[in-house]
Amino acid sequence: GAGVSQSPSNKVTEKGKDVELRCDPISGHTALYWYRQSLGQGLEFLIYFQGNSAPDKSGLPSDRFSAERTGGSVSTLTIQRTQQEDSAVYLCASSKERAGMSSYEQYFGPGTRLTVT
Amino acid sequence: AQSVTQLGSHVSVSEGALVLLRCNYSSSVPPYLFWYVQYPNQGLQLLLKYTTGATLVKGINGFEAEFKKSETSFHLTKPSAHMSDAAEYFCAVSGFTGGFKTIFGAGTRLFVKA
């Protein structure tokens, strides 16, 4: 079946512009995660959504970052007034979790490489 | 705060030699532990996981890891390295918030010499 897809694969933007990154999770996966991968920094947790629960936004680095998930499926990560330090690969993952039967296995998309000039 | 420490950003082994990648975590509650692998120009994929039960877990491609609570460690091993094992390996911890927030280590890049 189809895996996690992300678009665009690459995005170059000017400092100060807003960008939207999209994630399509695997169908039926209830949990969706966003991470940021910078060179030598590993994966930095940003936010995750689980079903209809309030998202865990504890990893968002500033109020310029926001994310939403519509209809329990597609998610959009928005970065407002981009800065050069926002340049990184943004990864999305999804997993199939439900009470009493959680797999905890995350399936990752290919990522969006964001470059802020 | 929960954290994951991977000792050594780069590890180099000879083909056929033992692979040992170290991971230590901090968590106030029993964690769920994972190793993910990222091959060159590919996405991350799960290598193995510990959630409950046996503390020695086996994963794909001959890798295994042992959860040692007393040492707060989850080191990854493989008895004999293969050239195809060259990749970046990430240790991760979850389950500490009652949800699925996952914290990843900085990664260890494994080089395999012929």
Image: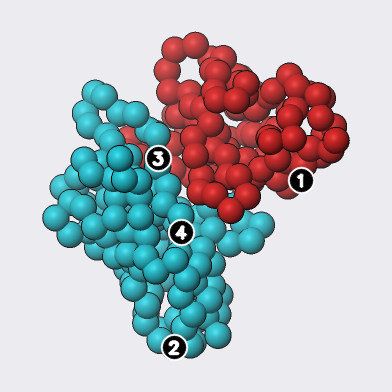
Chain colours: A cyan, B red
- Secondary structure at badge 2 equals loop
CB within 8 Å, label 4 to label 3: no
Q: Are marks 3 and 1 on the same chain?
A: no
Residue A70 appearing in the image: yes
Q: Looking at this view, name the residue that lies furthest to the front.
A: A1
| Spatial separation of the CA atoms under disc 1 and disc 2 | 35 Å
- Choose the circle earlier in sequence order: 4 or 3: 3
Q: Which chain contains the residue that carries disc 4?
A: A
Marks 4 and 1 belong to one chain: no
Residue picked out by circle 2? A16
- Closest to the observer, B61 or B108: B61
If you read the primary sequence from the N terminus, does the residue marked by circle 2 or circle 3 appear first? 2
- Circles 3 and 1, Cβ within 8 Å, touching? The answer is no
Label 2: chain letter: A
Q: CA distance from mark 2 to mark 3?
A: 32 Å
Number of the front mark, 4 or 3: 4
